[in-house]
Structures are given as structure tokens and as C-alpha cells.
Image (cartoon, grey):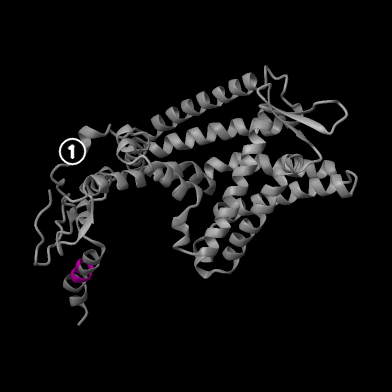
Amino acid sequence: MTEPPQTAEPTPPPGGPAPASGATDPAAADPPPQSPGAVRRRASLVGAVVSALLVVAIVLGSRLLRDFDSALLPYAVATVFLAFGVAYRYTVWISAPGARRLFRKGWGSFFSVANFRSAPTALPRMIATYLGFQKFLGARSHARWAAHQLVFWGCLLAAAITFPLTWGWFTFTSSTGSGPGYEMRIWGFEVLGFDSLGVLGWLMFHGLDIAAVLVIPGAGYFLWRRMKDRGAVTGQRFAYDLVPLLALIVISVTGLLLTFSSIFLHGGGYEFLAVLHMVSVVFTLIYIPFGKFFHIVQRPAAVGMQLFKYTSRRKDEGGEVFACRRCGQPIDTAPYVENLQGTMRDLDLGFADWAEYCPRCKRVLRGTAYLDHVKKGFK
């Protein structure tokens, strides 16, 4: 599977790397790359189909628009554009060789029955770790992890409430006509009755306020960090890094001000705040597929890749793993290393053989090459 560890300092060949034993020919395994025009046409078709399916789902889910609130039409239209943008961008993303391999391996492991049989708890743990609680962020900074959790759960709660209401799938109607009893219906079927003056009723009608309270401190922390942290300031871009945070804060603040206006100001300024809130939400929904928030859509593929690594390690327990060609220390499982080499070959990077060295040996070899070929010219 691997070459025995070498005591000499091997130098990777300057030409194209030879595939590792056991690896398949990438030309046979993957289709030839498509032209940018063909990719865009296919992505546009996929986006149009997904948008049409969402429109059909809105019409059917709202009982032929009987439960659809026309005042929420701008939000519904924005979600249709969101569906088109996500489908378009995702199709373009997985058309790239590296992303296509990640997509296949990740989702293949995600839906693998064999993986579920061998490790039935692996998938729920990966979902909870990488999607729910994002523990990998805690290794960087506990403050960043806490802020990310606030933004994540706040946005998730807001989406779970806003989208079904916007599409007319959820409706709240008075059960008696004079209150305080209310009924929550999904697709026209009653699923829950509650007292609007009770705790459950308060939570139902203030769910978006709770989401805003979660999002504001989280987004505010990241905005403060991008203003103060030198490392963040150096590489940030206004449209990519700052606009999403400002949009989240504007949405949350205007949403809370709507509640404040209705309770304490007797509706004063409500129309202006409603328009401002609507514009900020619509802008953010359309921005999601083409900005920093697109990583929300990409994250499940990373979960699948982590599952692929985990199941590969379980299969190789007690057996031989891919060892560093220089020092002999284990790098990772052979399937994972070969997948990494295949991705490098797909991208024509020209150094797939470096995947067979551990990080320490890579640094040593780079330093040796520098001393042999560069440093000797300075005497």
C-alpha cells in the first residue's frame, strides 16, 4: 500500500506525480471538466426547477393560496429567489473537480447504509458536533464559538418560524373569535391549541423576538472583532465580511422595534419600521447564495467528509494506515490520503505526492530545498 519509510531525504519528483497504488485513474473515475458556459446553463436549469418546485409547494401547502397572506408576498418572492440562488451556486460549486469529489465522498458516506450499520451513532454525533454545536470552533476561541452559537440558533429559530408563515403553511387562528384560545394549523390541519395569554402563547408570538435577542450579541461580537482584531481587519472585505453582520443586526433590531412600537407606542412608526424590516430581510435572503452565508449550505458536505474519515479509520483499526514516506509516522487512512491525492490531480496542482508526507516532514523538506537551491546563492 505504501512505500517503506526512507532514511534519506527524498525529494518529490518535479514532474506530475504518479498515482499511489490502489488509486484509480482520475480520468476514468471523473467526467471531463465542463466549459464555464455549460456549467452556468446547467446551474440555471437546476435553479429554475428548484424555484418552480418551491412555488408549487407554496401553492399546495397554503391550500391553493387560501392560507397565504398577501402582505407577506415580498418575503415569499425573496425565498423563491433564494431557492434559485442556492441551487445555482451549489451546482456551480460541485462542478469544480475538488468540490465534486468532496460532494461524492461526503454525501456517499452521509447516506451509506453500510456506514450506518457499522457505526449507527456516528452520523448523529457528526451532525450534532459539526452542524449543531460546531465544536471545531471552540479550538480557536471560546468567545467566537459562543457568538457563533448565538447567531446559528437565532437564525435557525427565525427561519423555522418565518419560512412556513411566509409560505402560508402555518396559520394561527382564534378558536372562539373572542380569544384567548388560539389554534396553530399546518397545511390546514390543527396540530396545537394554546392560550395566547399563557407561557406557550407568549413564546409562540414572540419567537422572532427571542431569535433577535440571540442574534444581536453574536453578530455584534463578530462586528466588534472585525473592527478591533488586527488579523481579522487585514483580510476582511466589506461586502463579504461586514455586510452580512450588519444585515443580521438591522433585521434583528427592526424586528424588536416593531414589537416595541406595537406595545409601547400604540403603533407609532410601525409602517416605516415594517418597510425597513422587509427590505433588510429581502436583501439578506437574496444575498445568502452569493455571500459568506453560503457556507451554511456547504456545511453538510463537510459533515459527510468527516463521516468518511471516521468510517475509514474504523475499517483500518488494527491494520496498516498510510505512513509518512520519510519518518514512517502514520498520516491517516489510505482511502483518505488517496482521496486527497485524487483531488490534487483533479485540480492539476502537480504535488499530489506531498500528501504522502506528514506535516513535520513537509516543513523539513521545504527547508532543505530552500537551503540547497536558494540560500546557497547568498554568500
Q: Which residues are magenta?
A: 365-369
- Give the image location of residue 323, x and y in percent: 17, 57
Q: Main secondary structure of the magenta part?
A: helix
- Give the image location of residue 70, x and y in percent: 75, 26
Instruction: Please name whichever residue, 187 or 379, is drawn nearer the observer in this view of the structure.
Output: 187
- Give the image location of residue 205, x and y in percent: 75, 40
Is 325 on the left-hand or right-hand side of 127?
left
Q: Is residue 368 magenta?
A: yes
Q: Quadrant of residue 13?
A: bottom left
Q: Quadrant of the C terminus?
A: bottom left
Compared with residue 174, is residue 255 higher up or lower down, i.e. above or below?
below
Label 1 amino acid? Answer: Thr
Compared with residue 272, is residue 75 higher up or lower down, i.e. above or below?
above
In this view, which residue lies farthest toward the bottom?
379
**Label 1 neighbour load within 10 Å: few <14, some 14-19, many 20+:** few
Q: At x 9% / y 67%, what residue is drawn?
A: 8
Instruction: Please name whichever residue, 242 or 306, is drawn nearer the observer in this view of the structure.
Output: 306
Is 366 on the left-hand or right-hand side of 177?
left
Compared with residue 195, is residue 334 higher up or lower down, i.e. above or below?
below
Residue at the disc numbered 1: 24
Instruction: Please name whichever residue, 122 or 336, is drawn nearer the observer in this view of the structure.
Output: 122
